[in-house]
Amino acid sequence: MRASSGPPSVGVLRSDLFAVSAMPEAFPARAMLPVHIEPGADEALVSWLVQLSWALRQSPLMFSRHGFKVDAAGDPEWWRRPSAGQLATIAERTGVEQARLKAMTLLGWSIARDDEGAQRFTSRRWTNPKLGRRKGRRVDVCGQCLAEDERPYLRRLWLLGWIGVCPRHRTQLIGQCPGCRCPIRFKGLNAKAPVDLLACQKCGRGLACLQGQRANDRSVDLQSLLVAGKKTGVVLLPSVGEVEWATMMAVADMLLGMIWTGVATQHREQLFNRIARELDLGWEDRLSLSLGSNYGSLLILDWLVADLPHRLPAAIGILKSVRFEGLLGRHNDIDDDIAAHLRTILAAAIATPAVGRGAWHPWIESLPDSASELRERAARERYKHRRQRLTAFAALKAGATVGEAAAIARVQPMSVYRWLDRGIEHGLEAALERPTGRPALTSAQSEALAQWVCADRANQNRHAIVAQAQARFGIELSLDIASNLLRKHRDRKPGSVRRRRRLWGPMKPRGPRAKPTHDLAPGS
Ligand SMILES: [Zn+2]
Ligand SMILES: [Zn+2]
């Protein structure tokens, strides 16, 4: 070795100057890992691997690279469908049999249309498709399952993306930290620092909680139907029959897309009110519909698929949504094969030209009120013509024919058809009013005028009423109508409790009639 008096010149190796040794490996290759964690029931492979790496104080990324020669930087989800070689390596290093490891993955389960993506059924998928994964994948968990675990871990089921309920506790999954209410996220196998899997990323608290929100039985049933379909590749839909997994996800996308894309909030809320009424939901469940959680979407889907032929046209009517072709046009990734299946399953959404007399069916179906609500409204209605129309519509909604509805409302069937035509064209409120050649007062306007008339004696003048109608509503009243209003409302004192006379009041028996004094049947 050359003695150096200045900085070493080119060609001198550092090892010539200092004693160095190779960097020690994190743990020796091909040997068993120094820790053992027993996998939990239905634990996801990702959960188990991340917790192994945490026990070794390693980042999941380095752990997979060194431990199993898997680079998760590009594909953090490799654990879902690992290769046979990867499984063999993991088995060798951890001492857990391959069959058991395989049961922690999704090998053999169907996958279609990114159905394993986080928050797959939530409204955010439609309203804000650019879901950020920077802070980790969002996941919904069952706080009770975690509370019961000796070592809390993530279930495979929770990582499917569209899961909303815990089948064991029959409760809704939670998507927010019970401590700080921030969304639950977890960093996966590509994390560059050790990950404490089941601690809130914001406040550090554990995610276990002792109580959960009870889930509606229908959501539990639909979810288990879908889980079975995910495993076998075929979903058995009650009203449809066997549906392949890829087609099922396309159906779900079409239906949820119909609700969350290009629809006014008020119409969506009307639909949710109807679903809540027909499924008999409590207020928490009703709220979950509006929030657009996975759980809420399961309820919506359950309501729709239980009776697609009737509920789908009703939903389209209430939402004022586009029909089948428009919905299909939003998904450019649906191939012709699946589109053909969709055309059969969602046939009720295909627009049929409104011809003949049955054309009123979809409109009646689309009314947000139920038959009994329409009847109640009719009973409260002050004007006879509106009562008649509401009664007829209530009968139609309850399934009566036009002839029967006309008989109930005591009019000719032709009148009912006329009301329906007006309703289809101008909506329910217009259908309840009498069509007149010239603009007439609606009941709200005539009520307002009536109050104005009886508020002040100076207003009790036909010409003043005509002028007032012109000024307030831009309507040219005839003097006859002004006289009518005047006659009805003139002598009402402001604040008086006298019963108002009604223009079209219900007929009321006026007590026992006096016996006729003359001979009813002369000559008998
Ligand atoms: Zn649970
Ligand atoms: Zn927190």
Image (cartoon, rainbow, N blue to C red):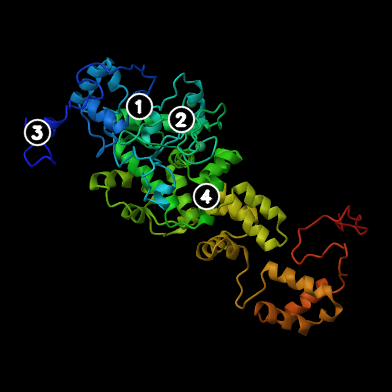
* Distance in Å between CA atoms under marks 4 and 2: 22 Å
Q: Residue furthest right?
A: 517
Task: Nearest to the eye among marks 4 and 3: give it.
Answer: 3
Task: State the CA–CA distance, disc 2 to disc 3.
Answer: 82 Å
Nearest the viewer among 147 and 26 is: 26
Q: Residue sitting at 17 percent across and 25 percent down?
A: 21
Of the numbered discs 4 and 2, the one sitting upstream in the chain is 2
Disc 2 and disc 1: Cα gap in Å? 41 Å
Q: Secondary structure at mark 1?
A: loop
Q: Which residue is mark 1?
A: 57
Relative side of 342 to 383, left or right: left
Which amino acid type is marked by label 4?
Answer: Leu
Q: Amino acid at mark 2?
A: Asp
* Residue 494 drawn at (x, y percent): 86, 69
- Which kind of residue does numbered mark 1 sit on? Arg
Question: Which is more N-terminal, label 3 or label 2?
Answer: 3
Q: Nearer the viewer, mark 4 or mark 1?
A: 1
Q: Nearer the viewer, mark 2 or mark 3?
A: 3
Check residue 221 in the rendering and tell me which mark sits there, or answer none: 2
Q: Residues within 10 Å of mark 3 (few under 14, many from 20)?
A: few
How far is disc 3 from disc 1 in space, using C-alphas?
A: 44 Å
